[in-house]
Image (cartoon, rainbow, N blue to C red):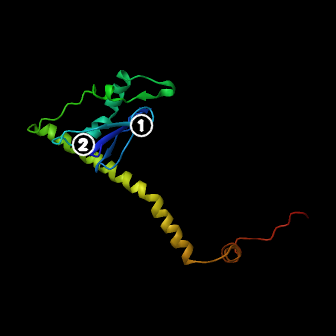
Amino acid sequence: MPLPKIFTPDLSQCTAYSLDETGERFFTGGVAGGYGILVKPNVSREFVLGLLNSRLLEWFMQQISTPMRGGWFSFESRFIRHLPIRLIEPKNKREARLEKEIVERVEAIQAAHRACVKLPEILHLKIAHAQNRTPCNLAHYLQKDFAAVLIESRIIE
């Protein structure tokens, strides 16, 4: 499905919907895979994603889904299609404001996640930079940093 979509794993202990903004991610169906949800062009994917990941729809899904061993639930399309998602009325200012707030929060969460994903790469670069700056061995550090804190002590008197 090379289209922008919302992903969900087939089995999960909690809601775990995510957004494929470019349509470049692929998945397999069945227990080892998941499902892709296509959102109508005139509906915000971020809005639907925010609703799907809400505690209320998670609770509802657990009521209608097949419970598995160990607290896992099925997130198959036959259950997802029964989730009570009501799209907003664009002319209703209150609903439009709520949709905007949900979309902003989803976008903030996605930005934080993207930053988190980049963190290992950033740390690796920082460590490599720090290692290249000061080529010192352990003896050098012991002499320089720890010599002042060592005091003479007698173990056996």
Image quadrant assignment for residue 89:
top left
Q: Residues within 10 Å of mark 2 (few under 14, many from 20)?
A: many
- Quarter that holds the C terminus: bottom right
Sequence-first tag of 1 and 2: 1
Depth check, front residue: 2 or 8: 2
Label 1 neighbourhood size at 10 Å, few (<14), some (14-19), many (20+)? some
Q: Residue furthest left?
A: 91
Image quadrant in which you'd find residue 60: top left
Residue 122 percent coordinates (x, y): 45, 63
Q: As shown in the figure, which amino acid type bears the numbered disc 2?
A: Arg
- Looking at the image, residue 24 sits to the left or right of residue 44; the answer is right
Element under disc 2: helix
The residue located at (38%, 41%) in the rendering is 27
Residue, disc 2: 45
Q: Disc 1 marks which amino acid? A: Gly
Residue 19 shows up from this direction? yes
Up/down of 49 relative to 111, above or below? above
Task: Examine the rendered structure and indicate whether residue 70 appears above or below residue 38.
Answer: above
**Image quarter of the N terminus:** top left
Q: Is residue 5 left or right of residue 147?
A: left
The label number, if any, that marks residue 33 in the structure image: 1
The number of discs equals: 2
